[in-house]
Amino acid sequence: MPVRATHATLSAGRDAVYDARARQGSVPIEFHLDDGSTLDGALILTSAELEWLHQQTSRLVDAHGRALGGTP
């Protein structure tokens, strides 16, 4: 039976990179497999996907702030 990825996390200590020529960004991630092993990888995003991800993560940061008692 093939090993499957259960989830992915951001790779610690590695920065995201934007390639202006390709108009895409690369975010280093680590895949966690169901056998307990990990694999390094990258999330490659177009400019439009980068903007969408920014909107989504900003919404999450706002929700986190509200949950900690910050302003709505």
Image: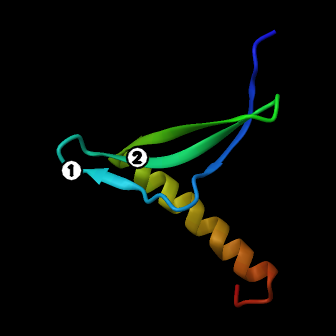
**Drawn side of residue 40 relative to residue 17, left or right:** right
Residue type, mark 1 in image: Ala
Give the residue number, with chain letter if any, for mark 1: 20
Along the line of sight, the residue nearer the viewer: 44 or 34: 34
Name the element at disc 1.
Answer: loop
Based on the displayed image, in which of its 4 quarters is residue 7 positioned?
top right
- The quarter of the rendered structure image containing the C terminus is bottom right
Residue type, mark 2 in image: Ser
Name the element at disc 2.
Answer: strand
N-terminal label among 2 and 1: 1
Q: Is residue 66 above or below residue 15?
A: below
Q: Position of residue 15 (x, y in %)?
A: 43, 60
**Drawn side of residue 57 relative to residue 23, left or right:** right
Q: Is residue 41 above or below residue 13?
A: above
Give the residue number, with chain letter if any, for mark 2: 26
Alpha carbon separation for disc pair 2 and 1 = 11 Å
Q: Position of residue 5 (x, y in %)?
A: 72, 30
Along the line of sight, the residue nearer the viewer: 23 or 32: 32
